[in-house]
Image (cartoon, rainbow, N blue to C red):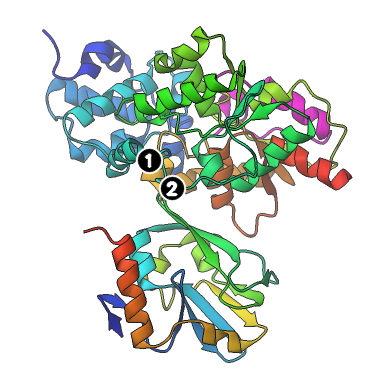
Amino acid sequence: MEIRGYNMPEDLYYEQNHFWVRDEGDLLVMGMDDFAQQLAKEIVYVQLPDEGKALQAGKKFAKVESGKWLGKVFAPVDGELVAVNEELETNPGLINEDCYGKGWMYKIKPEDKGELNNLMRTYEELDKWLAEEIEKYVKE
Amino acid sequence: MEAKYDFANKFGDQVLRCSECGFCQGFCPVFGAMLRPSYSARGKMLVLKEVMDGTIDLNNELIETLFQCTTCNSCLENCPAGVEVPEIIRQVRKDMVHAGSCHPAFEGMNEVLKEHTNIYAEEEPEDFERERNKKAEYVYFIGCVGSYREDEATMSTLELLDRLKLDYTLIDEVCCSGVLDDVGYQINEDLVRKNIDLILATGAKMVITGCPYCSRTFNNKPQYARLKDKGIKIIHITQFLNEFDFGVKTDKLVTFHDPCDLGRHCGIYEEPREIIRKIAPNFVELPHSRVDALCCGAGGGVRGAYPKNSLAMARRRLQEVEDVGADVVLTECNSCVHNLSNAKLRRQKFRIYNISQFINELMQEAE
């Protein structure tokens, strides 16, 4: 669905630092949302930690960089990092090209999928949140 | 008759002295990674000859060629005709800015440093859990990359200084702004004044920098002359750590990447090696080392303006690390650490550290 000019697919959860999460049964897939990839501009580096890394909800576990911007990647839930998108190692621009598809970043085995309920999902939540983010970050 | 551009007035004879032999192509990191003739010093001199002839003007079409140089000085070290390409490029960029042509990243950097304390426009520096601006014998000056991009490495360096019981202070430092002079602009006098005033207020007689580019700026740029006038000595951390025995060793195979700003620009090759010899008996040089070291690709603003090409240069350097089979590659420059770390592939299992960071980790393990 489009919200305030940004593509925010309906079937995803959204974390306040602009990472989306897709529930794929046993695993969660996460990536950067359209608002963030537009604001960051060309992504030049994505940190890809080793598989097996323990993740804690709200704690930074990786970083992303564009030309002069450094973004921190925060775990949306407690769990374990089980896979990274290795294509991003030499083609981090996939995030800009297709942030919800080929530009996926990490796969997580969650400890408790119930923690997804802490994330945003409804149109109303996302609309209110994006209005605030646009006000804060998007220059005229 | 005065030429149209200052570079021609100041360096026209040198541009014409370029015999187009192409020796520089064997050493230029930008050409080495991208294989595009106009990127080498020879290519740049050919373009500038056309500009001097009046065939072309300095304009936006020349941005990619003339702003894509890491200022590593490899060409200068290897030019049989002695053409001072880095100085020429520095002036050409000023001429281009004057003519209204500049890479947007550098234009942006100049604007950012008018409003912010660092090149990243970050509002809050890392705390590093240490008091700033106190009276001390030494000031430790971190630099923008160490403060905002390699904070873990910086924290480790500070822990080492604490272990050595150094009486030092951090300051509310601002960007040395030396990079602006390289990319077509002028050093920011407001930032210079802030740094000098903060350093003098500590009473310190020596500034130790984590960044060799900052130490070059403080030592060589006339805007920072007041520090020397006040008897303040500025050294890079490798010149400081060289005096110590650390009591730790590693059996890992270690190599060293010479930062351009430390090596070719300042002639500091031995001090880091003397430190490494104390802690790493299994040391191997990279195929291109000391004055021939391959640039990591970050310098001259290239990491900010041409990040993909910058990382391609870094990957070229890291291939050498892989080729010698090193477990660890040490350097002592946060820009190098940052760019090399970003470029390292997952299959490359060696680790990248500043020397100071590595020593601190060895000392931690020994506890």
Which of these two is toward me, A18 or B204?
B204
Residue B278 is inside the magenta segment: yes
Can I make out residue A99 in this image? Answer: yes
Residue at numbered disc 2: B123
Where A25 sits versus B287, above or below?
below
Q: Circle 2 — which element?
A: loop
| Quarter location, residue B331 | top right
**What's drawn in magenta, residue-wise?**
B265-294
Question: How dense is the environment of label 2, judged by Cα within 10 Å: few (below 14), some, or many (20 and up)?
Answer: few
- Which chain contains the residue that carries disc 2? B
- Residue B116 belongs to the span the image colors magenta: no
- Label number found at residue B116: 1
A82 to A38, vertically: above or below: below
User: Answer yes or no: do the residues labelled 1 and 2 have beta carbons within 8 Å?
Assistant: yes
Q: Label 1 to label 2, Cα distance in Å?
A: 7 Å
Q: Residue furthest bottom?
A: A25
